[in-house]
Amino acid sequence: MLIGVDASRAAALQRTGTENYTLHLLRSLLELDQQNRYRLYFNQRPADGLFPPSDRCEERIIPFPRLWTHLRLAVEMARSAPDVLFVPAHVLPVVHPRRSVVTVHDLGYLYYPQAHTPWAGRYLRWSTAYNAANAAHILADSVATRDDLVKHGLARAESITVAYPGLNPLYHRVEDERARRAVLERHQITFPYVLYVGTLHSRKNLNVVLEALRELVKGGLDLHWVIAGKKGWLYEPLFARVHELGLDERVHFLGFVADEDLPALFSGALAFVLPSLYEGFGFPVLEAMACGCPVLCSNASSVPEVAGDAAVLLDPHDAGQWAEALSSVLTDQSLRQGMIERGYRQSTRFTWPACAATVLRVLEMVGKG
């Protein structure tokens, strides 16, 4: 069977959630599957060595300036379609094989439309509905996302398979103090600090941690907050709020940070915080745990599935609760150590080979259907 994959996201120069999902899932699929052939479609030339060479895999580079998936990939499908098309992180082209599989990562735009621009919200609603209506089968990152698809009438439960993403093996605790400090000094990080990693936009709900940080600093705690992530939709009010609260010297925006530096950032942090209102999965929760960093996160959407019993789960709207929990985690060594140990165990439950095995079963099921 020839499996075609929209691999364009994997070739992005700055990879975040969906780009890393595409990259690591495809690497594991190609390693696991010794029977089928693969054709990877790119909108730009991928970096050398992005995928291991294989006589069962070909790369098709088809540049196009705009609407690459909708138009250029559609032309490719009309000319020479694979037996099955897999789109792991975008939308099906307007021309596609009947046997197509897509991953739906989340439906947060339905719950928090104010977190998106009007145009982005309309596009997300259209693309998700289009994918759900036209795919032969849907992959979901979590039970929460699967249940949302069913709840909102976008798909039937039997047409959805949950395939939990995995943890990038790059993430592990950096024990070498000099190596860790070299990364932190390069990013001009001030100690002691808590950490957030992720895109900056309003759905991430970072204001609740700002309020908690102000309360802790007013109470005499010497603490900084390091925020690593590129700017997303509607991020400007966050910067304004930092200034309003007088936290300019306590909150440090690093912008996008390469994967190679993140293990040192996690390893040097006193805690990792994810106050998000909605997550399709929440990769940084696992990344922090694998680096021995205690995690405090919201009790919303899929986050409890990922965090298990290893994190402190909090109401994303209660700043006082976040301040109290942060104070406890930062000062109670017994609590910290227990969270670290549980975090190491929890992070091993999610692997890319396991995800790839589930995805391969779906692709072969669709291909034979």
Image (spheres, grey):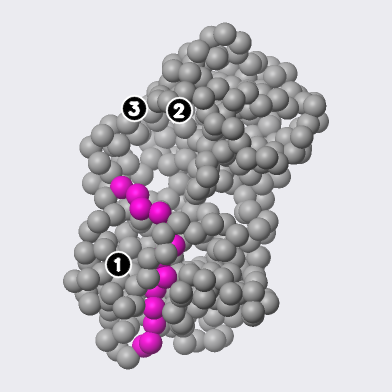
> Which residue has dot 3 on it?
126
> Which residue has dot 1 on it?
208
Is residue 76 visible to us here?
A: yes
Task: Give left or right: position of 35 versus 130.
Answer: right
- In the depicted structure, whether residue 304 falls above or below residue 27: below
Confirm whether the magenta stretch covers residue 122: no
Alpha-carbon distance for marks 2 and 3?
A: 10 Å
x%, y% of residue 135?
A: 50, 22
Classify 10 Å Cα crowding around label 2: few (below 14), some (14-19), many (20 and above). Answer: many
Q: Which amino acid does the dot numbered 2 rest on?
A: Val
In which image quadrant can residue 147 be found? top left
Q: Please state the extent of the stretch shown in magenta in the rendering.
A: 221-233
Comparing marks 2 and 1, which lies closer to the viewer? 2
- In the depicted structure, whether residue 77 falls above or below residue 63: above
Q: Is mark 1 on a helix, strand or loop?
A: helix
Q: In percent of the image, x 26 and y 34: which residue is there?
A: 119
> Which residue has dot 2 on it?
91
Q: Which of 231 and 275 is in front in this view?
A: 231
Alpha-carbon distance for marks 1 and 3?
A: 31 Å
Classify 10 Å Cα crowding around label 3: few (below 14), some (14-19), many (20 and above). Answer: few
